[in-house]
Image (spheres, helix red, strand yellow):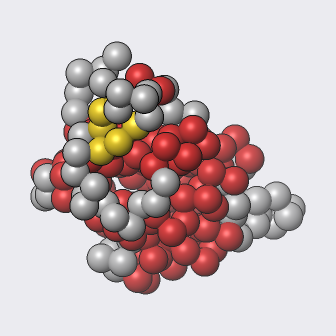
Amino acid sequence: MSTVPPAQRFRDNCVSLATYCLTLVEQAASENMTTIDPVLLRAGIMYIENGCTPNELIEGFINYSYLYWSQLHAKDERFFLENVSKVFPKWDPKIVDLFRRLFDTRRANGAPLITYDQKEHLWKIFQSLVKISLHHISENRQPYRTPDGNIAWRDVYQYTQIENLPTLIDAWGIRKSLRVP
């Protein structure tokens, strides 16, 4: 079991996501298929690494993304086309829109710019962010097992927007050992 706190793992995965997006943008830029400047993404990676705390990152993600977790779970591409800007409202909307358009971009031969395998990698990282968020939420609510074997939380006022945490934990395949110490 990892001893790294969920918020730190979250930040590490955000850096991985941003770094992977940088490779996609650099690829697209080399083919003159985007106007996104890779320098902007490098600055964004530096911000994720040094400009905010891991808790700020995970809290922002939870607050802005929880409505779209079912889309992320289902790998519904409408998430990227319709809702990614809602999850990252503090980012420059022009950059978010340009990145969103990369998912629709096709090469001259009709092949998508971002391949199936690349999209699967993005899904994997986004899904890891949700799983880490669920772990963080559960940990902050301080779960315990009642005498009858049910799960309860000491702090039911943390993350009240997240309903039915046990169901989400099960749906996302999170280890039961993370639900209750």
Q: Is residue 153 above or below residue 105?
A: above
Q: Residue furthest top?
A: 1
Q: Residue furthest bottom?
A: 94
The quarter of the displayed image where residue 138 is located: top left
The quarter of the displayed image where residue 75 is located: bottom right
Residue at the image point whose x is 69% and y is 53% from the top: 74
Q: In this view of the protein, can residue 82 be seen by the observer?
A: yes
- Which quadrant would the N terminus be assigned to in this image? top left
Q: Is residue 34 left or right of residue 142?
A: right
Instruction: Choose between 125 and 39: the one closer to the eye.
Output: 125
Q: Is residue 11 above or below residue 76?
A: above
Residue 85 picture location, percent across and down: 47, 76
Residue 114 picture location, percent across and down: 67, 55
Q: In this view of the protein, can residue 98 be seen by the observer?
A: no
Residue 128 picture location, percent across and down: 47, 41
Residue at the image point whose x is 35% and y is 32% from the top: 146
Residue at the image point whose x is 48% and y is 26% from the top: 175
Residue at the image point whose x is 43% and y is 83% from the top: 94
Instruction: Choose between 81 and 150: the one closer to the eye.
Output: 150
Q: Is residue 100 left or right of residue 64?
A: right
Q: Is residue 125 above or below residue 84?
A: above
